[in-house]
Structure formats: structure tokens, C-alpha cells
Image: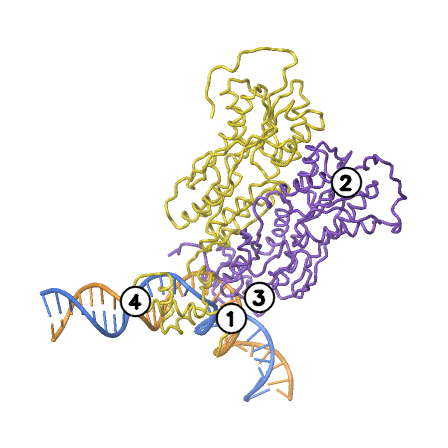
Chain colours: A purple, B yellow, C blue, D orange
DNA sequence: GCGAACTACTAAACCGGTTTAAGCAACGGA
DNA sequence: TCCGTTGCTTAAACCGGTTTAGTAGTTCGC
């Protein structure tokens, strides 16, 4: 009498002439099983085409064998951000080797907390990634309260019990500013991301710091929102000012590309009259006109590394913060020396600080 | 003695003074439970803060309460495509109300089949979405063989047992071509997606058909790959030809935007000398220069509808193909009348066919 | 020659739900 | 008065693994 459906551990046990428990032992490579018996069991399992039921294992082990990702951005913003797909692909690269799955939640911003609560309550995942960190991020306390292991993408301001992926945007921004300074720019503006996002703030502070390091006065900064619409609006604002900047450092490529279009509409030549840098190195960055000087990051690698750390954490191993390779400035055609000043207000080149990385 | 951890159905049963089974009955609203008792059970459950273990339920019901999505595109391509995040967000909107989760797999193209096999073998999901349909898609047979319910996004060429989300790109492309024809264009080229992708082929055929309908000769077509690099390359090829097209219909926005940059590099004014249309209406489409005339689709709504259909299918209900609202042409600044021909080769306006939608 | 220790294995409990079969009480009909 | 229903409830099996406790049979030490 053939029972329909997938074979279970019972069928294997019967076929090998042993008990269920022993099959489990043999499969999990535990000691106390005679070599000859283990071989017989594995052969029987293979012959039946048995693989253990993930669901049964999840129940008895009280583990989900999955990790979660809650995304609380509006879809428009997601759609243009090259970060996510690459990050997720990297995560999968690690997960797939280890029989783990990725559970994704895309929720309205208002439902973010509920998203994590639900993943935890349902026991859908054993841990989560914390993306788009905010200043004083309330999710850190939430996850601690929920007892849900997490790896933070970038290091939060307040110390936490969770390991962090050490992403440092500062050298990238610093390199962009240094590049502009080297070209001769002195009025270097910034179009920032929201200041409550850690990466928004960090990039802004890095820009500020780089100006100081170059001995330049503080430059104009417009807070924006990482969106194309926001980038366009911010650019218009900067170019409307009496004293126009000769260069704009954008906090991401999407805003920078929108900025290119605005400059063009206003008849401001890039890079002739205005230099522009982005951040991310999205695919389009190399295919707009002029091609965009930007900072290249490696979200795929981040995903791999973050997933590895999270799985180790879930396994109870002690996990330290994970370093990542530094970002690299990619110089293209959107940056050039500033236009010669209309009135020759000559000043000596930037004082103090002689070196730049 | 307080037992640690989450309360289980046992605890609720004990608190309400009934058996486990009755708690299950009460919770699932099954008949045969006295009203007074049901109330008592629900009260006890609420007091204990109990919610049923998803894992236990999954085991005994042989259901995962989750659906899957396997994405086999290279991450660069994903990153610039506004389709996915919006589609996924729409899927979630449906899922989250019903206690379902989304399991995502991003795999190398070579591992696509393995991705589905694994989702099925692990019992991680009860059904999947089939995206990026190909001509003679082998996954249709695979899923049938695996017994994994599916909803196809767009209707496959060969009939299947799976319901399809009826997405018709043709009216969108037709509207774009009609718009160009109305402006006076007669040499309308196409930069196509890969022809083995259904949406690549469908858009190309729709373009061909629209030319015929307008009484125009077949136009030049360059097969490309939906990427910015591909779009740029294809554009260069078209603009290098002896007889340049006066308009190019691109199969997606990403290629169109890359095309704009190429035109600019070559000194071809858009829309003065060349009109350009895209497909998708990505966020950036409204923020490049010139702003892009394109076809707006609604992937969020598609996600909602597809998820609804898939859940019904999984529940064993008969599911018909799901209609979707038609795409809409969004006219912006990248289209205009063609330049006056250098040599006045006068011909009467397009014959036959008088109406266009 | 007897208990201790070890090896190889089995039986049964367990994870936390759902579902089936059975039990009990009250009720209606003949 | 007895039987057949109907309504409510319980006990137990079940999903398919993991894990613990326990049992034979050997080997070792003294």
C-alpha cells in the first residue's frame, strides 16, 4: 500500500529498519550511530527521495529558519534606489547556501513598528535586518523588547546590543569634496537627505567637515528627501540664490540626476558652470548627460556580510561589528573646474591642512 | 508556577476550563460551541495575550501561509526598475490583512529553476507569482509538475492551468505611436527589450502593429535588454544610421533616459530633432531634461490583484483571469513635431484608418 | 565474577496547533 | 419507557520532525 505524498521520516525509518529517532540522529550527524547503520539510513533516505519537512523542524526546533526585512519606504522611492535589490541579492547569496529564507515586508511608514511586531509574534523569522537607521531609532528598543536578534546596517548613534555593519559614508563624501576642492571650487553646496536618517545626517556632516578640513567657509545646504522631486526642488533653490554655488554634492544619485535636469532647464551648464556629484553609483549615473561623478558603494557585499553576521548571531555565536570595504569616488563628466570668477577676487589657495586622501 | 515563554493553546484551555480542541473550535468560529463557552474562551485568550503559533498551525494544516516570489534578474537591472518595489508593496497590501507573508528569492539567472524547486520542496510557500514571463516559459511546466499554485503576471502564450493577471501593454504602446503619428512623425523607431521576454516581444509587436495601423512603413528596430547600457548602445546605433528616425519608442524608461543622454552627446536635440517615449513612468521620468513622455502603468495595483487571485487559488476557489486597468500615455516634453524635412518630399497624410484612441 | 562505563539503539514525550471519534446529557417521538 | 437525535464537550490521534530517558549488549577494571 503506497501512501501518497512526500515520504516522511517514518518511511525512511521503516525502510532502513530502524526507529525514527535514529534517522534523525544519522541525518544530523550526531554521534552514537554505527557507521554501517548510518550508511544504511542515508541510502534509504536517498532512495526514497526524502528531505526533512521544514515545517516540522521549525515547530520542534522553535526556529523559523528565515530572516526578515521590513521596508518602510514609499514605493516610488524604493523603485529608484539601487541599494535594495543589490542588498537583497547579497543577502540571498548567503542565505540560500544555508537553507534559510528571506521574508520581506513592505509597509506604509506608519505601520513599520507593527511590521516588526508581527514578524516576531508569528515567529516567521529568527532575526531581522535594520535598514534606514534613524537618529534615536525607536526600533532598537522595540527589537530588544521583542527579543528579536538584529543586525543594523550602519552603526547606530547610541550603542546597542546588536552587531552593526560598519558602513562609513564619510570617506566617500570627503573624497567627493576633496575632488571638487582640487578642481578649484570654493562654494560647494550640499543637497542632503532627511536629517533624521542616519545616512542623511552622516553625509551632511561629512560634507561640512570636509569643507572645514579644506579651510573653506561653511557652504549652503538644503535638506531634501532623497527623491527626484526633492532633488529638483532643492537644486532650484540653490541656483536661485544670489551667490550661486559652483558645485553641489548630492546625498544620492537620484537627487543629483534630477539636479542635472534642473540645471539644464535653467541654462546652467554642467560641468562648465556647475559641478555635480552624486552618491550610490546607480546604473543610470553612467548614462546621463553629463555622466555623473559619484561615490560607488557595494550593497551586494553588504547584504552578504550582514546576512552572515545575522545567522551567526541567531546561532548564539558572539558577533562583532562587521567591517566593509570603503566606498570609492568615481570621477566622470559632471565635475570640472569652476568658471573663472567674473570679478577677480583673488585669495591665496586654501590655508592650513595640506593633505587630502 | 509560571511557565516562561508565550502562552499556548493549553494555557488558554486551562484558564477557560475546557479542552484544547474546544479552544481551537472557538477560535476558528466553528459551530458546535455554546455561545457562553465561546465567549469565556475568547476572553481567556485575550487575557493571556495568546495568539496561535503560526508554526504549529503550518505543520498541522500542511500550509505555509506564505507566498513566494523568485526574481532572476541581475541586481543592476532590478535597481533601476520601478516595477518591483511597487508590485511587492501591492502584494503586501493584500497579504498583510490576511496573515500571509511574502518569501522573496533573488537568484542568479542560472539558479531560477532551483529557486522554485526549493521553495516547493521546503514547503516554504503555498504558491508563487510568475514574473518576467518568457516565450515558451519552462517554468509553467515546472510549477505544474511541482504542484505549486501560481498566478502569472501577464498572460502566457500557451494556455495554462494558472490564472493570469491580464496586463496588456499594447494600448500603451499604441497610444505612444499614435501620439507621435499625430505630431507628424513618419520614421518611428523602436528600442526593444529582449524578444524572449513576453513584455519585450509584446511591446515590439504593438509598435509594429501601430505603424501598420497608421499606414506607415515598417520602422527600424533595435533589440536591446532593458538596461541603461543597452538603451544607450541601441540609441547610438539608430542615430548613426543614414536615415535617422525622427522618433524612438523605447520599451522602458531606463533605456529611454539613457537614450536622451546619447542624443544630447551627439548633438541631437530632443524633442527638436528627435522625439522620445518611454514605458513605465518611473519617478525620474518627470525629472530628466527634457521630461519624458511615457506610458504609466500601475504595478502596485497589479500586486494587490495578483495576490488576491493567488490566495483564492490556494484556498481552492476557482479563479478566473484578472483584468487590470489600462495603461495611460503621459505626454511630457520629450515629444514634439518632427523637424521640417530638408528636402520637401510631400506625400498625402496617412490613408485608411481614421480613428485613434 | 560483578558493577561501571560505553555503544547502539528504541520508545515515548514533545513542539502547538487541528481534526476525528467518542461520550454524555437533554430532548422529542412512539 | 425506551430509542434516536441533537448539542456540547472531551480525549486522543495526527502533522513530522527533535530530544530525552531508558534498555539491551559489550567491554573494562579490579
- Circle on res. A243: 2
Question: Can see residue A190?
Answer: yes
Above-or-below relation of B317 to A130: above
Based on the displayed image, in which of its 4 quarters is residue A160 positioned?
bottom right
Label 4: which residue? Answer: B34
If you read the primary sequence from the N terminus, does the residue marked by circle 1 or circle 4 appear first? 1
The outermost residue toward the front is A242
If you read the primary sequence from the N terminus, does the residue marked by circle 2 or circle 3 appear first? 3
Q: CA distance from mark 1 to mark 2?
A: 64 Å
Above-or-below relation of A195 to A336: below
For the point 45% across and 64% down, which residue is it?
B51
Q: CA distance from mark 4 to mark 2?
A: 79 Å
Label 3: which residue? Answer: A147
Which element carries disc 4, helix, strand or loop?
Answer: loop
Q: CA distance from mark 3 to mark 1?
A: 11 Å
For the point 49% across and 77% down, which residue is it?
B2
Q: Position of residue C22 (x, y in %)?
A: 28, 69
CB-based contact (under 8 Å), mark 3 and mark 1: no
Q: CA distance from mark 3 to mark 4?
A: 38 Å
Label 1: which residue? Answer: B5
Which element carries disc 1, helix, strand or loop?
Answer: loop
Is disc 1 surrounded by few (<14), some (14 to 19) or many (20+) residues within 10 Å? few
Amino acid at each position: 500500500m503506497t501512501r501518497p505524498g512526500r515520504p516522511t521520516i517514518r518511511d525512511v525509518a521503516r525502510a532502513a529498519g530502524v526507529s525514527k529517532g535514529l534517522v534523525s540522529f544519522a541525518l544530523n550527524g550526531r554521534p552514537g550511530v554505527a557507521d554501517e547503520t548510518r550508511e544504511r539510513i542515508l541510502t534509504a533516505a536517498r532512495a526514497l527521495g526524502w528531505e526533512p519537512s521544514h515545517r516540522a523542524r521549525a515547530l520542534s526546533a522553535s526556529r523559523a529558519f528565515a530572516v526578515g526585512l521590513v521596508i518602510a519606504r514609499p514605493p516610488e522611492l524604493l523603485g529608484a534606489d539601487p541599494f535594495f535589490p543589490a542588498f537583497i541579492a547579497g543577502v540571498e547569496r548567503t542565505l540560500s547556501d544555508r537553507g534559510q529564507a528571506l521574508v520581506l515586508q513592505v509597509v506604509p511608514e506608519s505601520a513599520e513598528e507593527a511590521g516588526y511586531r508581527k514578524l516576531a509574534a508569528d515567529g516567521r523569522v529568527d532575526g531581522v535586518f535594520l535598514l534606514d537607521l534613524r537618529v534615536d531609532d525607536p526600533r532598537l528598543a522595540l527589537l530588544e523588547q521583542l527579543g528579536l536578534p538584529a543586525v543594523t546596517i550602519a552603526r547606530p548613534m547610541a550603542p546597542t546590543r546588536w552587531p552593526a555593519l560598519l558602513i562609513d559614508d564619510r570617506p566617500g563624501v570627503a573624497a567627493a569634496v576633496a575632488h571638487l576642492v582640487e578642481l578649484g571650487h570654493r562654494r560647494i553646496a550640499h543637497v542632503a537627505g532627511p536629517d533624521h536618517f542616519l545616512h542623511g545626517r552622516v553625509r551632511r556632516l561629512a560634507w561640512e567637515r570636509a569643507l572645514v578640513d579644506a579651510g573653506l567657509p561653511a557652504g549652503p545646504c538644503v535638506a531634501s528627501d532623497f527623491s527626484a522631486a526633492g532633488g529638483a526642488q532643492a537644486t532650484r533653490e540653490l541656483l536661485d540664490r544670489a551667490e550661486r554655488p559652483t558645485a553641489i554634492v548630492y546625498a544620492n544619485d537620484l537627487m543629483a540626476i534630477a539636479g542635472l535636469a534642473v540645471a539644464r532647464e535653467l541654462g546652467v551648464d554642467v560641468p562648465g558652470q556647475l559641478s555635480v556629484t552624486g552618491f550610490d553609483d546607480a546604473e543610470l549615473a553612467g548614462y546621463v548627460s553629463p555622466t555623473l561623478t559619484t561615490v560607488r558603494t557595494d550593497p551586494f557585499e553588504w547584504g552578504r556580510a550582514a546576512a552572515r553576521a545575522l545567522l551567526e548571531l541567531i546561532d548564539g555565536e558572539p558577533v562583532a561589528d562587521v567591517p566593509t570595504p570603503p566606498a570609492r569616488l568615481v570621477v566622470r563628466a559632471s565635475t570640472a573646474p569652476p568658471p573663472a570668477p567674473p570679478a577677480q577676487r583673488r585669495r591665496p589657495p586654501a590655508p592650513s591642512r595640506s593633505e587630502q586622501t
